[in-house]
Image (tube, rainbow, N blue to C red):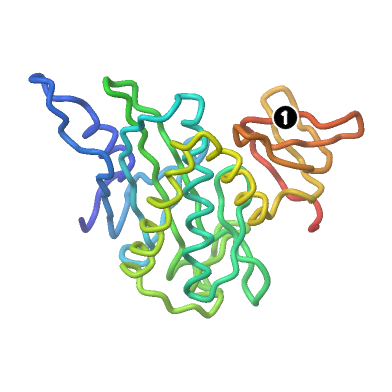
Amino acid sequence: MAETGSTNADLVAGAAVASGGSVVMPDGSVLVADHQTAGRGRLDRRWDAPPAANLLFSVLLRPTWDPDRHPLVTTTLAVATVDALGTHGVRAAVKWPNDVLLVGGTAPGKVAGILAELVGVAPVAIVVGMGVNVGWPALSDDAPPGATSLAAAGHAIDRAELLESVLARFEARLTDLEAPDGPERLRLAHLERSATVGVEVRVDMPDGPVTGTAVGLALDGSLLVDSGDGPVSFRAGDVVHLRPA
């Protein structure tokens, strides 16, 4: 579609089951927009980009895996996106918990963000959305702090081709949420692609910041941070990289 408020909000609304019990939107439904007027990131932060500049999409999932694995959907899409960008010659990594970064080159920084939402309907649904900075911000733009784009880094990639690449790898990676040993496979894949593990970080929590070294990832996707007294697990929180690995 040309424009909408939020692809996530549209799919959340579409996840409801009709009065007759039929599913309105099936598993794997994808909604793509050229422009979002109410795009959101973590903590309801606004994220505005010019029309037809970036890749903006959401996917509706109707999971059959264990509910404890629902939070891993974000990791799954992040890992899939890093792999998809790699097929286009782009070096990228996962910044815990929900960002993808360009690494190295002339314009490193955040190139994509992910937002997953659990929809409490029967059957339960998960909507996961992503915005990939394809053409905006350019190097000359007044970009949000830390943001970059594929164009700024010198990569001319068609949005439709990138979407196809990401969705194919996302679908393949979702099998890790079904298999008994899948979370460990996903953890190792995330670890190999992590921009956060091994880095001095600050985790901003409601009761105050925690600083230390990110030393690993747990099976549930949590970040393990050692402040000097042994690793502490964080399932959520804003992370600031204080120094590169």
Residue 150, above or below 222: below
Q: Quadrant of the C terminus?
A: bottom right
| Residue 167 coordinates in the image, percent (x, y) | 36, 56
At 31% from the left and 33% from the top, the residue drawn is 62
| In this rendering, position of residue 231 left or right of residue 126 | right
| In this rendering, position of residue 220 left or right of residue 6 | right
At 38% from the left and 50% from the top, the residue drawn is 171
At 33% from the left and 41% from the top, the residue drawn is 8
Q: Residue furthest front?
A: 180
| In this rendering, position of residue 33 left or right of residue 190 | left
At 49% from the left and 78% from the top, the residue drawn is 155
- Dot 1: few (<14), some (14–19), or many (≥20) neighbours within 10 Å? some
Q: Quadrant of the N terminus?
A: bottom left
Residue 81, above or below 116: below
Q: Residue furthest right?
A: 228
| Residue 214 coordinates in the image, percent (x, y) | 77, 43
- What residue is disc 1 on? 233
Give the residue type that dot 1 points to: Ser
Count up the numbered dots.
1
Is residue 175 or residue 204 the one in the foreground? 175
| Residue 184 coordinates in the image, percent (x, y) | 61, 40
Residue 223 position by quadrant: top right
Q: Residue furthest left?
A: 20
| Residue 140 coordinates in the image, percent (x, y) | 54, 75
Residue 32 position by quadrant: bottom left
| Mark 1 element type | strand
| In this rendering, position of residue 26 left or right of residue 186 | left
